[in-house]
Image (cartoon, grey):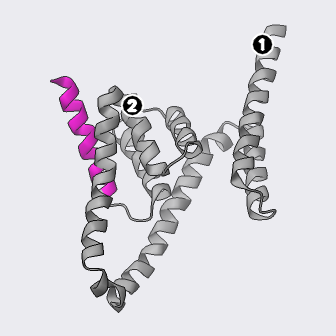
Amino acid sequence: MKILKNCLALFLSFFKISAFTLGGGYVIVPLIRKEFCDKRGLISEDDMLDIIAMAQSTPGAVAVNTSALVGKRLGGAPGVIAALLGAILPPFIIISVISYFYALFINNTVVANVLLGMRAGVTAVIADAVVTMAAPFVKNKKIVSILLVAAAFAAVYFFKVNPIFVILGGIITGILEMLITRGRRKEK
């Protein structure tokens, strides 16, 4: 009975978040973080950062991947199913309705202006996610991480490096940092 209650809570949380979030995965991720880290305290900030990193590095939509990983962390396999259904159903329903009325929406200036205005809100939510995720690194003065973020941004934005190579570089850097840290501990 407890599993069913937990799965229902996961489903409803993700359904609510997904139903009222416009702008895609990078907008829904900070809302998931606020719901499960800040509001409910079910996942630590560090664990959520790990979940987001894994969700971004696996194939598929980041919102769906994040939902599945949070569901797994909080409810095992049934939690994955509940979280995924909650995250996927609202967009499916909305897209089905919009596609039915597509001809009416396509040339409607009110709809076009509403969507244009929503871009500012989406941009603000994404900026909030970036600041929130970067804050622990700056606060803890993790110089390697800060430099890695700056180098990754410069590589993608200025030098047009394929993001896959940036992700691989981050993985290699993380492994090297771990090996160096372990080597220092063994010396002591």
Kindly give the residue lying farthest to the right in the view shown: 187
Camera-nearest label, 1 or 2 = 2
In the structure shown, which secondary structural element does the residue marked by tag 1 occupy? Answer: helix
In the structure shown, which secondary structural element does the residue marked by tag 2 occupy? Answer: helix
Q: Position of residue 75 (x, y in %)?
A: 32, 28
Label 2 neighbour load within 10 Å: few <14, some 14-19, many 20+: some
User: Mark 1 to mark 2: distance in Å?
Assistant: 33 Å
Taking the image as shown, residue 111 lies to the left or right of residue 130, namely left
179 vs 167, nearest the viewer: 167
Q: Position of residue 15 (x, y in %)?
A: 27, 50
Kindly give the residue lying farthest to the left in the view shown: 1
74 w.r.t. 116: above or below: above
What residue sits 31% from the left and 33% below the top?
79
Amino acid type indicated by mark 1: Arg
Kindly identify which numbered label has been placed on residue 72.
Answer: 2
Q: Which region shows up in magenta?
A: 1-18
Query: What residue did someone put label 1 on?
Result: 185
Picture quarter containing residue 18? Answer: bottom left
107 vs 111, nearest the viewer: 107
Picture quarter containing residue 136? Answer: top right
Amino acid type indicated by mark 2: Lys
The mark that comes first in sequence, 1 or 2, is 2
Q: Position of residue 106 (x, y in %)?
A: 36, 86
